[in-house]
Every structure is written in C-alpha cells, then in structure tokens.
Image (cartoon, helix red, strand yellow):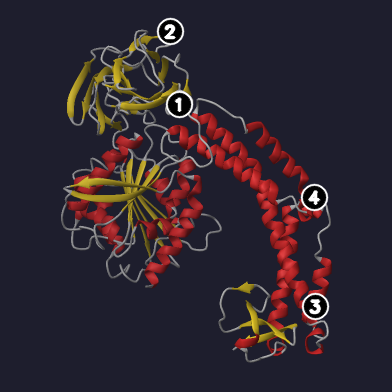
C-alpha cells in the first residue's frame, strides 16, 4: 500500500514539474502481438537527429515511480534529447528471453519514426531489475545502443561480457549501502571490471570522495577505465549515503558519460525534409517525399526509400556533390488511410550507413463542407421570383456528376447547374418554364464529388414559398411555425415581464424596462425569409429580458426576506422571553442596516448581498429562539363547527398547503358575530 501511495505522490509531483516539457505522452506499440506502452518526454524544441535515453524501472515498479525518482526529464529542454520510460508487462522484466529486448528495439524504431532521433546515439539506463535487463540484452543490443548506464543492479546469473562482440561503453552507479544488490555480496566492482578487461582498457583513474556537485550531500568513488579499443570507456561510481533507490543527482553523471558516445562517428547523416511531422494528410492527397543526406569524409553512394518496409525508390551517386548535399525525391500518390513509416537508408562510399525514419498518419479524407448557402435551409415566406440558389463549398464540386432536383406542389424539376467566377461557388437555378406555387419545396442534392474524387453526403434542403401567418397559438414542426413561433413567444415573454415590473417596488429599474420596451417595439413587426435572422431577433430579445428578469428575481427575494424579518420583529415585540435576546436585537439591526436605497436597488450584487445578510440573521434568530417561538404559539383544539377557514404556515411565516408536524395553523372563527384568529401549533 505504501508503494502505491508513493507512486501517486511522485506522479503528482512529476505532472506539476513537467509542465514546461512536451511530457507525458503515452505511446502504445505492438510487440509480437501484444500492445505495450511507454511514457515519453520531448523537449519543447527538438532538433533533428537528437539523442534518445531509455530508462527501465525496477521490479514491482512502473514508469511513474521511476520518473518521479530520477528526474531525468528535467534535463531535456537544455540537453535536447528524448527520454522514454517503458512499462514492464506485469511486475517484472523478461531477463531470460527476448520479449522485452524486442520491446526496446521497437521503442527505438518508434522514436526514430516519430521524432527523427539519431539512431547512432541511443542510450539505455535502468534501475534494479531494469539494470538486470540491460545486462541480459547487452551483447545483442551493441549495434543499437551507444552507451549503457545500469544503476543498482546486475544480471548475476550471466556473464554478459563474454558474449559481447566488441568493446562496451558502460557506466554503473551503485551504492555501497545497497541492501538488495549488496555491493560486496554480488561483487559489483569485479563485475564491472570484467568489461574493462574485455575492452582491453589501458588507463585507470580513481577519484575518491567524488561529488557530482561540490555541495552535494553524498560522495563516493568514481573509477574510470579508458583507452580501450575504438575509444571505449568503462566507469563505476560507488557512492556513500545511498541505498537501493534511484539517486536523482546521478542522472548528471550518467548523461555526461553517455552523451560522448556514438555507434559510428563516421556514418553519414541525413534528414527527411518532407513530409513534415506537423503536416496533415488524407488518402486523397499526393504527398512529396524528399530525403536529404550528407557525408563529412567522402560522398553518399545511395539513398534507399522505404514505405512500410517496402522499397519505393533508390538514388545512386558516384561522385562528390559540389554542394555536399545529396537528395532523393519521390511522389507518393493516394496513400491508404493508416499509420505509415517512411524510412531512408543512407550509405556512403565507405559502406557506412545510417537509417532515418518518420511516422506519417494518413487520415480518411474529410468530405466536402458546405460553407454558405443562399437562401439558407428552411427559409420561408420566399417570393415566387426566388429561383436561384447559391452554394459555397470548401472545395470545387464536380458539377458534371452532381444531381439537383426540386420537388414541391405535386411536381418536380431538374435544376440548372452553373459555375461562377469563384472555383468553390456554383448556382442552381429553377428553369423559367417551371411554375413555382405557394407551399413547401425540397431541394435534393446527390452524387456530389469534389476535385479529389471524394464524395460528400447527400443534401435535402427545405424551402417555403408564400407568406405563412403564425400567431401565438400556432403549432407545428415546419420552419415557419418553429421560427416565427419562437419569436412570438419571446415577444410575449418580454411584454409580460414589462408589465410584471410596473409596480413601485421596481421603479428604480426604468432604464432596464425602457431598453426592453424599445426592443419589443422594434421587433413586433419583424419579418424575414431567413431562419438565422429570426434566431438573431430572438437572441436580441432574450438579451434584454435577462438583466431585467434577474433584477426582478433578486428584488423579489430581497422583499420577501425583509417581510419575513419584519414578521418576526412584530410577532415578538412584546414577548420578553424573545425580545431581550441578542439574536432578536441583531435581527432588528440587520433589518435597519440592510435597507437598500434607490441607487443600491440598481446593483444586483448589492441586492444579493443585502438579501443574504438579512437571511443570516433570520436563520440565527430561529436557531437561538426555537423553543420560545414554539411556546409563544398557543396549542388549541380546533372546533370544526366554528371554523370559518384554516390556513397553514411554517415557523418562518411561509404558507404551506397541508398540515404536518412542525407547522402551525391560523384558525379563523366566528363567535357572537365576531371574527377571531388563533394560532395552533401542530406537534
């Protein structure tokens, strides 16, 4: 349980601190039929051919724990590299087989495709069992990893140095006080020295009491074996004051070591000029692909282009280019909608090569979008002279294939299609010999293709010819009833509100009322053929209704709460058991102090504040004097024969419909020709 709590805290810290990076992108890839995932950090600005650091977590841990401990992601904006935290398949890594090695290989390929990382500068660090995985895979990964940086773990059941085919660049960080991989128990120093021996190193240096930073809280012994074949180097940092956990400051030592190494310094370089990773493509597009390559100590002999591992083009060169740049161009026509990998293998005259790749996602083409239509759909009250319909799409439409039919009044006709001076605009015209009549018509558009040969959805448009009268009682689903009905309803709502605020209690609101009346007067005779214009008219009315309605609601609440306070003040004015209490005194003061003047009644915030203020003192009064309030109400038996009427109220004075416990009744009776009122508490 403690482990999971720590992960949650660390993840929260990481998310908070990593906001400056293009973090925490979870990437999923398919490995041998299984979906695996990793957490990826990318700097805000990532140059092409940047390095990649892979970090594998410990047993029973996860990327969130590892990243929250080592803080490697904090370095990427300045050092310009991508860092990946793979997630194990379960609680352990496959340190005896090839499942997770294949995962790491797929990660390298995926990062090369997505971010154009330099495949010659890939580094691998890990913690505990994540380091065991490094040693297990090391011999078979020498051609993919330029430097290894395991921490706090070894593969004790294997001797990986014996399987390595060439020198290894290796730095191991391990605490003297590690209680899982005991330093002496597992012979950590001897284990690392095997690689120095295998690399045939000639130089040895030891820095005792070494601190990565001068004021760092821990130190250790840094040993370096160098002068090996091909410039290889082996290092061991054995530090004090640590245990079996990732030490985040060690990341600086690890990165300083790893970044100096590359698989082949003399290999050619290259980049994919197009397509860009930020470009959006669909399967209807034609995509230009351009590969550019250079070689610093000779010339490029060939560039081979692959799309999804299939050869698509090859460019051969036999001599040095004057510009030093070698290019391959290819036109990718109508790619399938899917995720593709563009890969180029660049080979120089020394037969050294470099592979670069990029992931490109091809979407299904978006169909045509209708940007504008005149008259718009559902237009009504159209004159019989309205025979031209103008369409504006986002792309040119193939009119030769499109079908346009106009149906209504028991007849139909094919419309005349015409291009305009604007490529994305065309018109449809009702033939002159077709007689329009009052009533509803439908315009059907089908077989609509654009210039990319992508088909759009069929359209059905509604039009209404002739004037259609609508009053407040009209109902129906056709456009004239819907849009005119909404306007009439809004106008009536505005008139009702104007009348409802005619009383003296709203006299300070004349500015809002006048604005409302002006809009009502201006729109009473409103007429248009456009549903949009009707919607705008309704919105205009609602915009002036809203502030007056809000003001009325706020004032009504204010007057209600003042009436309630006044009722309690009068009810107990002569009752010393209540009127001597501090709650009663404060209620009187609140009633006096929270009285709005004319200016304040024009400010909603002030009205609300005063209402809430009085209500607080009422609530306090009821709470402090609940027993006295109940005792002050007589408990009488209701004599049904003498009852003229009974009304029921709660203790705040609000009328309720039926008697229940905790309310009282006011009984009005006639006795000797006189009317009397008595309060009866229902217990």
Marks 4/3: CA–CA distance: 28 Å
Q: Dot 2 lies on which element?
A: loop
> Which numbered marker is on residue 379?
1
- Mark found first going from the N terminus, 2 or 3: 2
**Image x and y of residue 464, in percent:** 42, 25
- For label 4, count other residues whose C-alpha is less than 10 Å away and answer few (under 14), some (14-19) or many (20+): some
The residue lying toward the viewer, choosing from 420 and 276, is 420
Marks 1/3: CA–CA distance: 62 Å
> Which numbered marker is on residue 421?
2
Disc 4: which residue:
508
- For label 3, count other residues whose C-alpha is less than 10 Å away and answer few (under 14), some (14-19) or many (20+): few
**Image x and y of residue 495, in percent:** 65, 44
Q: Nearer the viewer, mark 4 or mark 2?
A: 4
**Image x and y of residue 511, in percent:** 76, 43
Name the residue: 66% across, 91% down.
Answer: 635
Marks 1/2: CA–CA distance: 26 Å
- For label 2, count other residues whose C-alpha is less than 10 Å away and answer few (under 14), some (14-19) or many (20+): few
The residue lying toward the viewer, choosing from 345 and 138, is 345
Is disc 4 in contact with disc 1, using a CB cutoff of under 8 Å? no
Disc 3: which residue:
570
Asked if one can make out residue 503 in the rendered structure from this viewpoint, the answer is yes
């Amino acid at each position: 349980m403690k482990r999971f709590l720590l992960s949650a805290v660390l993840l929260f810290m990481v998310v908070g601190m990593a906001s400056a990076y293009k973090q925490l992108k979870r990437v999923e890839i398919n490995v041998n039929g299984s979906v695996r995932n990793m957490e990826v950090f990318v700097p805000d600005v990532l140059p092409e051919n940047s390095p990649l650091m892979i970090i594998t977590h410990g047993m029973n841990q996860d990327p969130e724990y590892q990243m929250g401990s080592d803080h490697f992601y904090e370095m990427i904006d300045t050092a310009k590299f991508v860092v990946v935290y793979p997630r194990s398949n379960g609680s352990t890594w496959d340190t005896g087989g090839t499942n997770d090695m294949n995962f790491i290989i797929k990660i390298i390929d995926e990062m090369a495709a997505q971010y154009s990382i330099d495949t010659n500068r890939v580094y691998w660090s890990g913690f505990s069992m994540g380091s065991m995985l490094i040693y297990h895979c090391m011999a078979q990964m020498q051609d993919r990893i330029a430097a290894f940086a395991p921490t706090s773990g070894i593969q004790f059941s294997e001797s990986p140095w014996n399987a390595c085919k060439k020198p290894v660049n290796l730095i191991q960080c391990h605490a003297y006080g590690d209680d899982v991989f005991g330093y002496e128990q597992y012979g950590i120093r001897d284990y690392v020295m095997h690689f120095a021996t295998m690399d045939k190193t000639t130089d040895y240096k030891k820095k005792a009491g070494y601190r990565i930073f001068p004021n760092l809280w821990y130190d250790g012994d840094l040993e370096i074996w160098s002068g090996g074949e091909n410039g290889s180097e082996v290092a061991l940092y054995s530090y004090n004051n640590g245990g079996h956990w990732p030490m985040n400051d060690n990341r600086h030592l690890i990165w300083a070591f790893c970044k100096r190494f590359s698989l082949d310094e003399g290999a050619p370089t290259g980049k994919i000029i197009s397509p860009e990773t930020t470009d959006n493509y669909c399967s209807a597009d034609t995509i230009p692909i351009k590969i550019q390559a250079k070689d610093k100590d000779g010339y490029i002999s060939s560039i081979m282009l692959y799309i999804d591992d299939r050869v698509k083009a090859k460019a051969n060169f036999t001599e040095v280019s004057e510009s030093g740049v070698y290019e391959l161009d290819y036109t990718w026509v109508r790619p399938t909608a899917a995720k593709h990998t563009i890969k180029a293998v660049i080979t120089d005259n020394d037969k050294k090569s470099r592979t670069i790749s990029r992931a490109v996602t091809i979407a299904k083409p978006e169909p045509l979008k209708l940007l504008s239509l005149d008259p718009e759909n559902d237009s009504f009250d159209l004159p019989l002279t309205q025979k031209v319909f103008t369409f504006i799409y986002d792309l040119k439409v193939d009119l030769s294939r499109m079908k346009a039919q106009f149906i209504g009044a028991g007849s139909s006709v094919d419309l005349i299609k015409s291009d305009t001076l604007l490529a994305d605009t065309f018109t449809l015209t009702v033939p002159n010999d077709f007689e329009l009549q009052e009533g509803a018509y439908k315009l059907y558009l089908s077989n609509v293709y654009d210039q990319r040969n992508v088909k759009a959805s069929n359209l059905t448009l509604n039009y209404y010819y002739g004037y259609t009268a609508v009053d407040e009682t009209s109902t129906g689903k056709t456009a004239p009833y819907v849009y005119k009905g909404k306007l009439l309803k809004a106008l009536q709502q505005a008139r009702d509100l104007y009348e409802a605020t005619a009383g003296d209690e709203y006299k300070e609101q004349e500015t809002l009322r006048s604005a409302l009346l002006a809009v009502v007067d201006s729109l009473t005779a409103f007429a248009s053929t456009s549903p949009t214009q009707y919607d705008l008219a309704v919105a205009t009315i609602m915009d002036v209704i809203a502030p007056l309605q809000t003001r009325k609601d706020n004032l009504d609440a204010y007057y209600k709460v003042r009436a309630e306070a006044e009722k309690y003040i009068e009810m107990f004015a002569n009752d010393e058991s209540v009127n001597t209490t501090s709650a009663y005194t404060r209620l009187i003061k609140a009633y006096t102090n929270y009285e709005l003047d004319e200016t304040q009644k024009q400010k909603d915030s002030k009205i609300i504040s005063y209402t809430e203020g009085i209500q607080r003192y009422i609530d306090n009064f009821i709470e402090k004097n609940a027993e006295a309030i109940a005792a002050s109400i007589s408990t009488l038996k209701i004599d049904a024969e003498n009852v003229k009427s009974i009304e029921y109220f709660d203790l705040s004075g609000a009328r309720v419909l039926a008697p229940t416990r905790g309310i009282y009744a006011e009984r009005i009776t006639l006795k000797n020709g006189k009317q009397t009122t008595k309060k009866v508490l229902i217990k």
